[in-house]
Each structure stands twice: as C-alpha cells, then as structure tokens.
Image: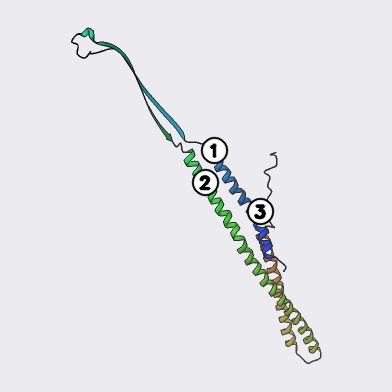
Amino acid sequence: MHLDLARETAAAQRDRPDLKLARLLVLASAEDQRIIEAAYYPEVNAVVSGDYIPVSGIRRGSEGSPRRSDDIISSEIRAGAAYTWRVVDNGKTGGAVLRQRSAREINELLSQKLEANVPRELERLYNNLAALTARHRSLEDAARAAEASTAAINSNVGNGVLSQLDFRTSEASLLEAQSGLADAAYQQSLALAEWDRATGRYFQFTDQRGAEAR
C-alpha cells in the first residue's frame, strides 16, 4: 500500500464533490441573504398635521382711553404645524433576513463539519488499510510455508515415513491459509473502495453555473 495520507487529505478537502456542493450552498445562502437585505426595507409612514387659524377684525383696547373709537383694529394670521413619524417593520426585513441568516449559518456549520471529518475518516481508513496489508503479507508467508510443508509431507507419505493423516492435516492447514489469504484480499478491496469513496473518486459534480441554459 503506497498512499500519502497528508496529500490525499488535502486533495479530498479541496476537490471532494460533496464538499464543493456544501461550499456552493453556503455561497448561495449568503447571496440570498444579501439579495433579501437589499430588496426590502422597513416601511416608513410620515404623518403631517397642521393648523391654520386666521384672526381678523380684532379690536384691541387702547390702554388709558375710555372711548371705543380709540381701540386699535388689527388682523392676525396664526400658523402651526405638528409632525409625527413612525417606522413599521413589515416583516420582510426582520423576518426573511433572519430566516435566511439562520439557513446560511446551518449550511456553514454542516460544511465545516464535513471538512473537519475528512482528516479523521481518512486516517481511520489509512490505518485499517495498513493493518489489512500487514495481515495479507503474513498470510502470504503462511500460505507459502503451508504449501511447502504439504509437498514435503506428501513426499514422505510416498516413502512410507508419514501417514495419510499427516498429509490431510497439512493439507487442511494449507487450505485454511489460502482461505485467509483470499479473505484478506477481499477485505483489502473493500477498504480501498471505502478509501476511494472518502477521497471523492467515486463522485462527479459538474459546476454548470457558467453554462447557458438550454
């Protein structure tokens, strides 16, 4: 087994299709949030009220004179205005933005969790492959030794030195070693398939954002 764990881990974190998709979902969520924030504003209601009070033909008493003819006739205009305003959150800002922000944060957490899990998963698979490789080599040596022993015993049985029971026992040991070797090879194949899955070799994801819609 010749695998570079550090290089494979970096490549998986960079190129694995499901991680690419997770990062795209984060970008899409952030873009949706930006669009919502740009498109909706609080509703502003301005209320203006005014009072116009014309006052004319008013006689002001002349101080110190008892005669009405000495009163001063004047005309006045009184103007006044009162302004009030209020901002009403129509829900599109406070509601939609918060919901979209929540979706973006969830996508970010899931993406970070996937990326953080890659090194641990690949390290576990790497150690498993190393153990299976060592077991396969050990069983290869055992199978070769059992095969040589069976051949030697068979020769001695022909010479009358050993019995058929010895040969059958040796043959059973050889079959056991060969069976273990086949099982180790099968387990290695499964582990390599799992390794390829974890590194993203079994997935294909096409980014067609730049392609024209057909």
159 with respect to 67 (left or right): right
- Compare marks 2 and 1 and give the one earlier in the sequence: 1
Among the 4 quarters of the image, the one containing residue 62: top left
Q: Residue at x 76, y 79 (%)?
A: 144
The quarter in which the C terminus is drawn is: top right
Q: Residue at x 71, y 84 (%)?
A: 169
> Between 213 and 177, which is closer to the camera in this rendering?
213
The quarter in which the N terminus is drawn is: bottom right
Q: CA distance from mark 2 to mark 3?
A: 24 Å
Q: CA distance from mark 2 to mark 1?
A: 14 Å
For residue 38, which numbered disc appears in the image? 1
At label 2, which amino acid type do we have? Arg
Q: Does residue 201 lie above or below 173 as drawn?
A: above
Q: Can see residue 56?
A: no
Q: CA distance from mark 1 to mark 3?
A: 31 Å
> Between 35 and 128, which is closer to the camera in this rendering?
35
Label 2 close to label 3 by CB (< 8 Å): no
Task: Name the residue carrying label 3.
Answer: 17
Task: Name the residue carrying label 2.
Answer: 101
Within-10-Å neighbours for mark 3: few <14, some 14–19, many 20+: many
Mark 2 residue element:
helix
56 with respect to 175 (left or right): left
Residue furthest top as drawn: 69
Residue furthest front as drawn: 64
At label 1, which amino acid type do we have? Ala
At label 3, which amino acid type do we have? Pro
- x and y, in percent, of residue 209 in the image: 67, 43
Of labels 2 and 1, the one closer to you: 1
